[in-house]
Image: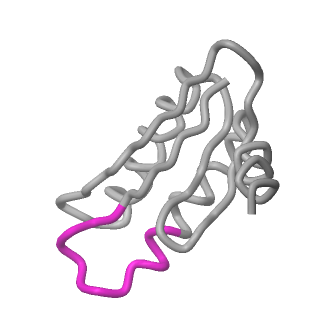
């Protein structure tokens, strides 16, 4: 199970990006194969790493389909294989230590 942080943003459309983020989020909602959470700077995905890559590619294409000519994508992956890890578990682990 992988936890993947992804940020997808066109670089040639000005400074307001929310409609592009919404288009990428819509892909996640419609695909339905990964759990996800929208955060202020990234969207966090949880699922099979190969499926996450497939969905990220679809998210990029959704932004290009809106007219973007250049899209920057940042991906950070935590692919833990010794035990099941979930988004909430990572947060809970830190909060327990506060």
Give the quarter of the image for residue 38: bottom right
Residue that appears at 33% across and 50% down: 74
Residue that appears at 75% across and 37% down: 86
Residue 20, compared with residue 25, is above or below; it is below
13 left or right of 93?
left
> As drawn, which residue projects farthest toward the front?
97
Residue that appears at 55% across and 32% down: 52
**Most foreground residue, 7 or 27:** 7
Q: Position of residue 66 (x, y in %)?
A: 37, 66
72 left or right of 78?
left
Does residue 54 show up magenta in the picture?
A: no
**Most foreground residue, 11 or 89:** 89
Q: Position of residue 2 (x, y in %)?
A: 61, 29
| Quadrant assignment for the C terminus | bottom right
> As drawn, which residue projects farthest toward the top?
82
Q: Which residues are magenta?
A: 9-21
Q: Position of residue 10 (x, y in %)?
A: 28, 66
| Quadrant assignment for the N terminus | top right
Report if residue 29 is visible in the image: no
Q: Position of residue 32 (x, y in %)?
A: 74, 40
Please tell me how many numbered marks the rendered image carries: 0
């Amino acid at each position: 199970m992988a936890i993947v942080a992804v940020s997808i943003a066109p670089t040639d459309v000005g400074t307001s990006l929310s409609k592009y983020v919404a288009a990428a989020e819509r892909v996640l909602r419609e695909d339905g194969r990964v759990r996800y959470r929208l955060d202020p700077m990234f969207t966090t995905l949880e699922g099979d790493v190969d499926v996450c890559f497939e969905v990220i590619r679809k998210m990029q294409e959704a932004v290009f389909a809106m007219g973007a000519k250049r899209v920057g994508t940042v991906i950070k992956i935590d692919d833990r294989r010794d035990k099941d890890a979930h988004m909430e578990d990572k947060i809970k682990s830190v909060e327990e230590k506060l």
